Image (cartoon, rainbow, N blue to C red):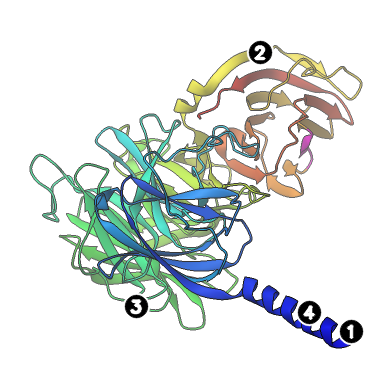
Amino acid sequence: MIKKLILLLLLCGGIAKSSLAQQAFTTTFDVEKQYIKIPVKNGATKRNVEIKLNNEKLRWFNVELADANPDWYAYLYVGDWKGSKLTLTVDALPADSKAFSPVQQAEQNTEERDYKEPLRAQFHFSPLRGWVNDPNGLVYYKGEYHLFFQHNPYGVNWGNMHWGHAVSKDLVHWKQLDEALYPDNFGTMFSGGAVVDVDNTSGLGTAKDKPMVLFYTAAEKAWEQGLAYSLDGRTFTKLPNTILDKITDGNRDPKVIWHEPSKHWVMVLYVTEPDNLHTMHFFTSTDMKSWTFTSKIVGGRGDDRYMHECPEFFELAVDGDSKNKKWILTGADSQYAIGTFDGKTFTPEEERLFSQHGRDYYAAQTFSNEPKGRRVEIGWWRTHTNQGNNSFNQSMSVPMEIKLKKTAKGLRLVRIPVKELQVLRNKSTKIKKKNISAETANVLSGLSSETAEIQLVLKPNDSKKIQLVVRGLAINYDVAKQELEIDKVKAHAPLIDGKLDLHLFVDRTGVEVFAAKGETYMPVNYNLKAENLSYELRAEGGSATLESLEFYTLKSIW
């Protein structure tokens, strides 16, 4: 009896071991439709997948592959090879996996739940599926704003860096397109910028079609800078060779501008030097393909992330005076320097200034070739959307115009939400001048909305604290300190002519606050409770005068 039991256990163990056995998997399939569907299970073991045509690798990536019952499907565009026979290989799969048995195909990149998810921000851009981080290559081209972005199409966490792509006519409503840049033999596609080569200095366009030119880092392998171009804003061709050799491991994020007085292109590149020193290197070129080093700016070291990653470089008029301009150089955390630039060397006059005071706002970039001559910025906003079986993660900020103003502290950047956002306004409520205190009734008691835009001007008088409660999230203003506090995030917000000026945008995943006429920008990521749609306004420790308040419910961009 004991021997039979041992034999039974051994057999069961063998069966269990067999069901868990991993083996390489290969299948071939005829490309009949535009996309193949990749089944994803959030949190599953990552598998390496390759797609080949006649033994030539076309696409490769890792993915948390679902052996059965996927949380969602990633869509891989294969329309360029319709009618061909492709080979799909996975490095290891359980013997009983149904991941690609068979390979599923689809003509359209659509799923029933697209843009209907509970944590989907309603007017902040987020990817259809997958992970998003840095905005890349913001540019206006042939009647459209182009938003490229760091994208992992196959998972809700960072990895497999591609350049995703979306377009808009109005900076508000975005249509996501297929990937613009895929990883290649030089590496994955890290961040960079884009320009329109109006004079075709690169020779990549024609008299009729001026090229849109993308600059990116081929990362994690070569650490060289690459160039791709497009004549239609939809299809992109990479040069066969990179345009700038590796300086150090981790050099990345090329930002390119045209310097009109010098009649040449300027590239600013983040370079990590020995002992983890953060620097920005400047290069010049007349054809975009050959670059000459001219100068560098030294930032912080290690955890002192001044001038760390994702450079942005532009010129602004002081208070709109075209005869008085200054150059602005920023890093990924939005710390910036103000100075002068002669086409080769940037000379800082003020450094280590902060232009945003929120939480998890990073790698902001501005549009080149903006048709109205504005300096419009969008940043990566790290929202808390990686939950459950969600098929997307992270988002962008609202677009905002950056200006350079004289303030009590000197020259400073200010941010103003772009006027195009007003198209989202739906029902409006205006509240006229009235006194408020802890004892008065809530003047916002009749308001209820999941999304909102709020503009208010308030005179604190003898009150000690002003509190605006947005769907359960308290926005506190300490009058004596002239300080805003939201979910333990604090920022100085000066009174202007003795008045508190606030402009807020409320979405499912947090609030963006513009205070003191744009001197203070405070994005705070916070998942608001779906059941709480209420708003409150109160003054504590005294009375205050509400000069004006405008409240708008907002429509979804989806």
- The Cα atoms of the two marked residues, 4 and 3, are separated by 63 Å
- The Cα atoms of the two marked residues, 1 and 2, are separated by 86 Å
Q: Given the image, on which type of amino acid does mark 3 rest?
A: Ile
Residue 142, percent from left and from top = 24, 35
Q: Which residue is mark 4?
A: 8
Q: Choose top left, top right, bottom left or bottom right for residue 539.
A: top right
**Which of pointers 1 and 2 lies earlier in the amino acid sequence?**
1
**Which of pointers 4 and 2 lies earlier in the amino acid sequence?**
4
10 Å neighbourhood of mark 2: few (<14), some, or many (≥20)?
few
Q: Given the image, on which type of amino acid does mark 1 rest?
A: Met
10 Å neighbourhood of mark 4: few (<14), some, or many (≥20)?
few
Q: Which residue is mark 2?
A: 430
Figure check: 468 above or below 339:
above
Q: Residue 93 versus residue 428: which sits nearer the camera?
A: 93
Q: Which residue is mark 1?
A: 1
Q: Given the image, on which type of amino acid does mark 2 rest?
A: Lys
Residue 550, percent from left and from top = 64, 18
- The Cα atoms of the two marked residues, 2 and 3, are separated by 57 Å
Identify the magenta region.
Answer: 472-480
Q: Residue 402 versus residue 206: which sits nearer the camera?
A: 206
Q: Given the image, on which type of amino acid does mark 4 rest?
A: Leu
- The Cα atoms of the two marked residues, 4 and 2, are separated by 78 Å
10 Å neighbourhood of mark 1: few (<14), some, or many (≥20)?
few
**Which of the labelled discs sits on residue 247, or is there none?**
3
Figure check: 182 above or below 113:
below
Residue 269, percent from left and from top = 36, 66
**Which of pointers 4 and 3 lies earlier in the amino acid sequence?**
4
Q: Is disc 1 in contact with disc 3, using a CB cutoff of under 8 Å?
A: no
- The Cα atoms of the two marked residues, 1 and 4, are separated by 11 Å
Residue 235, percent from left and from top = 25, 47
